[in-house]
Amino acid sequence: MKQTYLLIILLVAATGCHSEKQLTDHVNPLLGTATLWETEDLGYERTWDERTWGAEVFPGSSLPNAMVQLSPVTQFRSGAGYQYEDSVIYGFSHTNKGHWNLLHLPLLPVQGHFTPGDYASGYSHENESARPGYYQVFLERYGINAELTSTLRCGYHRYSYPEDGEKKLIVDITRTNNRVREWNIEQSDDYIFTGFQDAEGKIYFYALSNYPIEGIEQQKDSLHEVAVVTFGERAERDPLELKIGFSFVSLENARMNLEQEMMNKSFSEVKEEANDTWNSLLSKILVEGGTEREKGIFYSTLYRSFLWPALRSDVNGDFTDEQGNLVNEGFRYYTNPSFWDDYRNKLVLLGMVAPDVTADIIRSITDKGEKRGGYMPTFFHGDHASVFVAGSYLRGITDFDLERAYNLLLKNATVPGRGGRPYLDEYMQNGWIPEKDTTNVPTWDEYKAAVTKTVEYAYDDYATALLARALGDTTHHRILMERSANYKNLFDPSTGFWRGKIEDGSWIEDFDPYYPYFAYMYREANAWNSLFFAPHDPEGMIALYPNHKAVEEKLDSLFTEPWRGYEAHNMTGFIGNYCHGNQPAHSIPYTYYFIGKQEKAQCVLDSIMDRFYDMGADKLAYAGMDDAGEMSAWYVFNAIGLYTYSPADPEYIVSVPLFDKVLFTLGDGTRFTIRKKGNGKKIEQITYGDIPVEGWFMTHDRLKEGKQLMIITD
């Protein structure tokens, strides 16, 4: 009873009391952490032992685009390291993206008996809480209440131990989601331990305790090796607190980061500052109307849209560059964006709200590109830094060296080589990439994903051409614009699908539009989910079909033809054969606009927003992987009635928002308003500043005029 009462007091103190509801109160960092298990949610019967991919997000503490993401680990080598259905916690790690990597320096407070191979603690969701900049959980095995908060480059741990028993801390120094190549940990003062861990980046740490350190011991058994820090006693029986500074440059910089960001602050102060930071960011988009559920999903997805890319430079501007050198160029250095995923929407949202961060990300990728062979960094598949840079520049973000960035992107588009676009030589020679001539390809086999690459390279060519035009490079503008039509080369009029070709130019015969592939012809999709991708040329794309009726029938079939029961980790959440659980199909619903059937698009958009963002038994699952914020940003944009149909172009396609009123504050301080009138699906008229808008698109420049966008429905 005494322990239960103590826990209640701790939880009340942890969550705090606010007289007014804050925007952070709408955010649930646990949203997206659950996995889909139910057949009705998955769209098929599970037969594999491996669990289907969830949103792969973390529930722990972070500031926007921070270096530190301080979050629980329930399973290593599993997405973001946390799965809601897991029953034990291995530690609290300090870096996270949600892509099966990172998780630097996991720590776990312990006492009593444990071994290096058996130390994880059980926990209950009833004794777990999370909000932006704060995470709390009760570790049942040890009777310890753990609380976490953070700054940009530092983590703050507060552990409330039972009154009796010594205080120990496991530092899982040999483990992350990546292979740990080298590590070190040592006591450097009575209250300080330091070291580094080299695993996808060499991270240095400087940890200050409020309890004296008696010693650090390496413990190893047949299963694992950990470091154990033992703390001494002090007169006051306060919680054990650890303030830890981090740096990817040096131990001295880790200490500097700690001293400047956290040294003289209490846990409550850091937690409240984190909350204030998030409230400030979330207030950039204020919504009225809608249900509490819709507001909860909206602000949770808005929150999750601003966690990646992650900061990698220190408070003085130092960072370690691609060649391993210490550099200070006067800008904040960031990790690469998750280009294949978030170029579609999240990076545009980032630029609208935080243009200074966007400019520094472009500076960062330019610096990396110039030091890694002259190619702009790519990610996973495609070459979408071109879309990011073009879209950012044309929206008015110019505080970077455009010519330097363009030179890298032009090399990506025109010079085959390691570091640039895969299979670029084949693409340039044919106007398309040939796929292997084979049959009975298993879903998970890796090939070229030649259809997806071809149509996406065509769009990247268009984006790079926009930059060529801005810089007066007329020759490459003409060449790249011609190549931007290459998406047509793999359209098969006999089937109405984009379809793979083999080297002699004939169609792949083993063609089933319902069958999903990881990388044969299509990247993480089937032919249905690879329809209608030419954001730069929707009219030309529509013209490939006999008439608008044929396009409408194709779209209707996509959303009504049932999924055939194929099982794939990364394809879940279906409307017919449309899969919202992966990115390739995310722009397809808007195709209805270009054949005069906007209301059909709205029916699909509303269904997606209603069904796919709080799924599963616990209402905490997305339809699929968030992919560093892309899935979240899709919801944010559609909920306010704008979408980045062609993210390279400084414009937005207008839809019917969920909310009656939206007040959007751009990064330069300009405010515009979005209102809807009526509750129908069909848009009868769009006005801006009481002037009718022609067509379906609003330009970024017009939004910057700070007027009211009115969407009138039937």
Image (cartoon, rainbow, N blue to C red):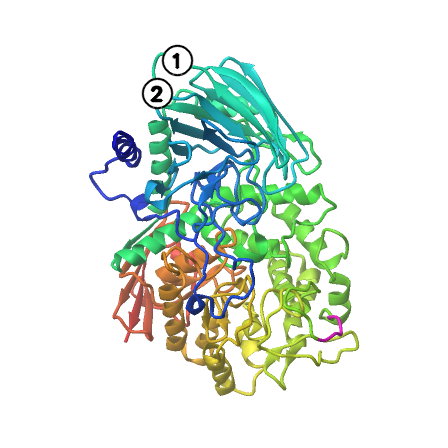
Q: Is residue 536 left or right of residue 424?
A: left
Q: Mark 1 is on which residue type?
A: Arg
Spot occupied by residue 224 in the image (x, y as percentages of width and height): 61, 35
519 inside magenta stretch? no
Secondary element at tag 1: loop
Spot occupied by residue 254 in the image (x, y as percentages of width and height): 55, 25
| On screen, residue 373 above or below 633 | above
Q: Quadrant of the C terminus?
A: bottom left
Tell me the residue that label 1 is attached to.
234
**Looking at this view, is 303 or 425 the one in front?**
303
Spot occupied by residue 403 in the image (x, y as percentages of width and height): 64, 48
Whether residue 43 appears in this view of the structure is yes
Secondary element at tag 2: loop
Which residue shows up at 76% across the image and 78% down it? Answer: 505
**Looking at this view, is 677 or 566 the one in front?**
566
Which residue shows up at 49% across the image and 72% down it? Answer: 578
| On screen, residue 217 above or below 373 | above
Q: How many marks?
A: 2
| On screen, residue 447 above or below 194 | below
Whether residue 399 appears in this view of the structure is no
Q: Mark 2 is on which residue type?
A: Asp
Say the numbered circle drawn on residue 9. Answer: none
What range of the chain is rendered magenta? 435-439
CB within 8 Å, label 1 to label 2:
yes
Q: Give the main secondary structure of the magenta stretch.
A: loop
Spot occupied by residue 298 in the image (x, y as percentages of width and height): 35, 55
Q: Quadrant of the N terminus?
A: top left
Which quadrant of the structure image shows residue 598? bottom left
Q: Residues within 10 Å of mark 1 (few under 14, many from 20)?
A: few
**Looking at this view, is 442 or 99 the one in front?**
442
Say the numbered circle drawn on residue 238. Answer: 2
**Looking at this view, is 266 or 355 the one in front?**
266
